[in-house]
């Protein structure tokens, strides 16, 4: 669905651009994003839609920052653009390659996304062990989405029980003002607690594990 929406948005913007050119109007130049601006867009999952809104003007700049400068935020963006075919020809394997490069540099959003893809089998075969590996790294970096997904996996009896206390501690300390997410965290913690002795749960609450 996300791919279809982005494709329609891309087509719409390009048609608008051609229309402007036909009437003699030049495109307004778009400034390349700062690293902090791009990271904010990625955290809000608005990075691909912003590329479309900016009428695909920044493709070469993004490519240069991903390939030559090797900036993890731009590696992630370039990888996503390739994987979903946004403003460039779709190339899923190459897109995943750049996502991995970003993950290797510790970009938490890339770690979480790769963990999610391995968990649900998007673009690749399901691999719970790989999903846990990436999600554990993202969870340790305080990514709440990764922590919640990892808790779901653990609550299915997967993964090592030795890792349950650390995740319980991280989720117990999680902060959110979203009532639905808060309720979901409480449910995940309750299920995870059922899989551990009471003294282990108490220790995890006090960050002793």
Image (cartoon, rainbow, N blue to C red):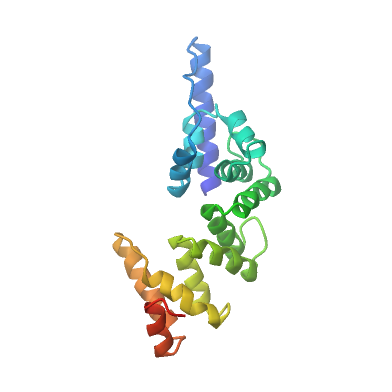
Query: Where is 46 relative to 161, above or below?
Result: above
Q: Nearer the viewer, residue 150 or 137?
A: 137
Which of the 4 image quarters holds residue 177?
bottom left
Q: Residue lying furthest front in this view? A: 208
Task: Tell me residue 50's x, y (percent).
Answer: 47, 36
Task: Tell me residue 118's x, y (percent).
Answer: 61, 62
Task: Tell me residue 16's x, y (percent).
Answer: 49, 23
Query: Where is 53 relative to 185, above or below?
Result: above
Residue drawn 58% across the image and 77% down it: 159
Residue drawn 48% across the image and 72% down it: 152
Query: Where is 29 relative to 89, above or below?
Result: above
Q: Nearer the viewer, residue 90 or 69?
A: 69
Which of the 4 image quarters holds residue 183?
bottom left
Query: Where is 20 relative to 41, above or below?
Result: above
Report the number of numbered marks: 0
Task: Tell me residue 190's x, y (percent).
Answer: 38, 80
Q: Nearer the viewer, residue 153 or 86?
A: 153
């Amino acid at each position: 669905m996300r791919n279809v929406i982005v494709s329609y948005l891309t087509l719409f913007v390009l048609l608008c651009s051609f229309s402007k050119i036909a009437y003699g109007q030049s495109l307004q130049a778009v400034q390349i994003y700062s690293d902090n601006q791009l990271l904010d867009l990625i955290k809000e999952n608005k990075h691909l839609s912003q590329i479309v809104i900016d009428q695909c003007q920044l493709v070469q700049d993004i490519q240069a920052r991903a390939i030559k400068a090797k900036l993890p935020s731009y590696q992630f963006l370039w990888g996503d653009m390739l994987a979903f075919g946004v403003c460039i020809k779709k190339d899923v394997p190459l897109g995943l390659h750049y996502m991995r490069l970003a993950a290797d540099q510790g970009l938490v959003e890339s770690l979480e996304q790769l963990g999610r893809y391995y968990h649900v089998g998007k673009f690749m075969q399901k691999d719970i062990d790989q999903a846990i590996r990436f999600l554990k790294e993202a969870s340790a970096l305080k990514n709440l989405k990764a922590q919640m997904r990892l808790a779901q996996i653990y609550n299915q009896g997967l993964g090592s029980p030795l890792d349950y206390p650390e995740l319980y501690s991280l989720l117990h300390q999680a902060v959110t003002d979203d009532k639905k997410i808060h309720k979901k965290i409480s449910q995940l913690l309750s299920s995870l607690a059922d899989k551990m002795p009471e003294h282990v749960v108490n220790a995890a609450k006090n960050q002793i594990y």
